[in-house]
Image (cartoon, rainbow, N blue to C red):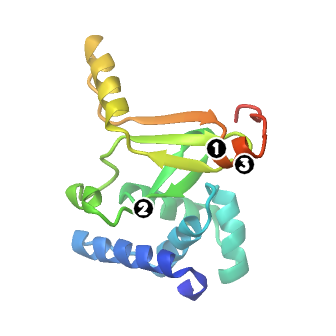
Amino acid sequence: MTEDFSPNTIRLLDIAAERCTRRGARLTELRRHVLGLILEVPSPSGAYDLLERLRHSRGPSAPPTVYRTLDFLVEHGFIHRVERLAAFVGCIDSGSHEEAHAGAHSHAAQFLICTACKRVAEIDDHDIARALREAASRVGFQLSRTTVEAEGLCAACTSQGARPGPAT
């Protein structure tokens, strides 16, 4: 089913499969296909959008099946859930950051959400993460995980004169 994916997506899927094997998990055909669908598009994918896209290539799938697959992919650090959009974006780093963290996302994710085109950019800014840890510490709170979601306009929409859309 992955033959329709771009060479880069296939490369990332192979990285994910190899990491699953090292962790004693399996990137099943369905998990691989859903991950490929997420990696292949520049915008976040919602669960029902994924169900529709799967229906075209695999026939009907039940929502619980897709949700279990998404849970697996989040748990293993291959995707992030963008809460504000109730959607998912890929996050397979072919570098050392993923190798240093053998499970779910250990890095502090920050998402920039374009209110015009709905694209999402992930940044991994250590200064932002440090500032959050320090602010939490000042009030006696110890962070275990952080995700920041900020809304605005991406460079492409700004250069096209787009105006910020309504908050999502």
Between marks 1 and 2 in the image, the one whose residue lies nearer the viewer: 1
Contact check, label 1 and label 3, Cβ < 8 Å: yes
Task: Report the residue that reaches farthest toward the top.
Answer: 139
Q: Quadrant of the C terminus?
A: top right
Image label count: 3
The CA distance from mark 1 to mark 3 is: 8 Å
Residue of label 2: 72
Amino acid type of the residue tagged 2 in the rendering: Phe
Sequence-earlier tag: 1 or 3: 3
Q: Secondary structure at mark 2?
A: helix
Horizontal relation, residue 166 to residue 150: left or right: right
Q: Residue at x 32, y 45 (%)?
A: 107
Question: Residue 143, located in which quarter of the rendered image?
Answer: top left
Residue placed most toward the observer, 115 or 44: 115
Residue drawn at (30%, 77%) of the image: 18
Please tell me whether residue 42 is drawn above or below residue 135 in the rendered image.
below
**C-alpha separation, residue under disc 2 versus residue under disc 3:** 28 Å
The kind of residue tagged 3 is Cys
Element class at badge 3: loop
Q: Give the residue at x 50% y 82%.
A: 7
Residue beneath disc 1: 154
Quadrant (top left, top right, bottom left, bottom right) of the N terminus: bottom right
Q: Which residue is located at x 61 percent, y 60 percent?
A: 42
Residue 158, percent across and down?
70, 41
Mark 2 or 3 closer to N-term? 2
Count neighbours of disc 1 (C-alpha within 10 A) and say few if under 14, some if 14 to 19, many if 20 or more. Answer: many
Disc 3 target residue? 117
**Between discs 1 and 2, the one toward the N terminus:** 2
In this rendering, the answer to whether 157 lies above or below 13 is above
- Relative horizontal placement of residue 106, taking residue 166 as reference (left or right): left
Q: Is residue 132 above or below residue 77?
A: above
Residue 30 x %, y %: 52, 76
